Image (cartoon, rainbow, N blue to C red):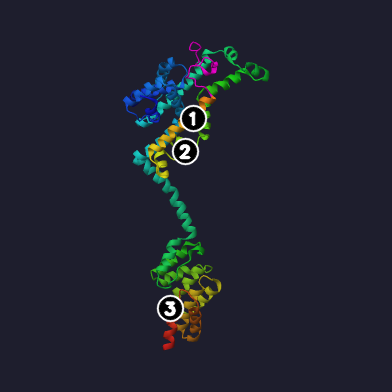
Amino acid sequence: MLIEKVWEKNQRLFRSIVRATIRNPEDVDDVLQETYRRILNTPWRITDPQETFYYLKKSVRNTSIDWNRKMFRRNLTVKEQVSDYEKLEELQTSGDNPLSSLLEKERELTDAGFAREVLNAVDELPEKPREAVKSFFSLDGVSPPKQLCAQKNIPYSTLRSRMEKGINLLREKISQKNPSPFVKNKSRTLLHTTGRRAVK
Amino acid sequence: MNCKNVLLYEYLSGTLTPEEAGKTGDHLDECDECREKFRIMLALDNPRMIDRESRFQRILKTSMRARMAVAGFVLAILVPVLYSYFLLTGVPGKTANLASAEPYPAVLLDTRNSSPEAGISTGLLLYREGKFREALAELKKYEKNSDAMFFAGISMYMLNDPAKALEQLNRVKNISGKWSLPADWYRAQCLLKLGKTDEALAILKTISESKNHYQQDALELLRKINNQ
């Protein structure tokens, strides 16, 4: 079966995707299992290996994001979360609904918020790395790498290096704004840690 | 493996060999920085968009039926549109070629102001084929169009009816600046056939005095007439 073959071939990548998306490394196997179960339950008829690859990659990512949300809600009661907020007093005095604020925080924690932050940071990059990043990730209608190389008359390796530089700059920018959830730091608030208190 | 030789983009694209992918995955498990970069790449990667593009491109590349369907769809839209357009405006290139390929009259048809009626093209086609009678019958339908009137006049001339041709060309000269000079040239021809040499000479002299398409022909004809 094609799905099984593609899954088998790219299992290492899928594992890395889950690992990079969820906040508790111990859950990686559970998420992969859940993804595989979902995929096999979906009557998905695809005959092209490349198409299957994109479909599986998307499924892995979506399941990981769902997993984050589920864990966030399961492991923390509203009361616990509120107690962890440093700005609880501000929330209360400003009259905001703590639940809606929490949901907002949850959205920020998941990929939607992160992706938005990354995309905003891309626009702040210097011209060459920005163009290269947009080319490699098909953003804003910039030509694909090979076409762009032909247009600019530059070797592929140069464009590839610019993209790499762009990603490094993005990492620096984002880690300044938002400390990594993967770097252990005792001073972090709950929002920057795993959904499970045990890990903290 | 160290951070410098990790090919994260290729890893995410699924283009590494299983062995390379394994090493990259192991490195990602250990290296926080690379995992951060990988997470950024994941955020930039839009599988949904990639899916749509690649699926469409792949279908087009691999399926002859899909290509035929796309080509059919394009033709189904393009053909009626072009047909309607040329039906309304005439076939400009064709009209110009027809007229310019024809020895009589040796002028280019300015199609920018040509008649919207496609029948004029039919008339010119008949004219080009030397079917002057049929051409005349067709072109006479368009009495308000200077192109049709002019070629109707020439057809009359070719049918050896200089009197009617002259009458027609006089009308053309009065209503059309575009055909004024060619009309003069053929008016002179008609007058010569009718034996009105003086009037013909006056017209030919006017033509020869300015630089135009008929100047050399007019000068030569004047010389021939004067030598006789």
Residue A25, image x and y in percent? 43, 16
Name the kind of residue labelled 3 in the image: Asp
**Label 2 marks which chain's residue?**
A
- Give the alpha-carbon distance from disc 2 to disc 3, as whole Å: 66 Å
Mark 1 neighbour class, 10 Å CA radius: few under 14, some 14 to 19, many 20 or more = many
| Structural distance between the alpha carbons of marks 3 and 1 | 78 Å
Q: Quadrant of the C terminus of chain B?
A: bottom left
**Residue with the mark numbered 1:** A170
Q: Quadrant of residue B18?
A: top left
**Residue B11 seen from this side:** no
Label 2 vs label 3, nearer the camera: 2
Q: Is residue A1 left or right of residue B106?
A: left
Q: Chain of mark 1?
A: A
Residue B57 position in % (x across, y down): 39, 38
Residue B143 position, x and y percent, is: 52, 69
- For the point 51% across and 28% down, the residue is A173
Q: Give SS at disc 3.
A: helix
- The answer to whether the residue labelled 3 contacts the one labelled 1, judged by CB atoms less than 8 Å apart, is no
First in sequence: mark 1 or mark 2? 2
* Left or right relative to A118: residue B74: left
Residue assigned mark 3 = B217
State the predominant SS element of the stretch in magenta. Answer: loop
The magenta region covers A178-200
Badge 1 amino acid: Leu
Is A101 left, or right, of B55 in this rendering?
right
Q: Which residue is mark 2?
A: A128
Residue visible at 34% across and 29% down in the picture: B16
The N terminus of chain B lies in which quarter of the figure? top left
Answer whether labels 1 and 2 touch (C-beta < 8 Å).
no
Q: Chain of mark 3?
A: B
Marks 1 and 2 share the same chain: yes
Q: Is residue B1 magenta?
A: no
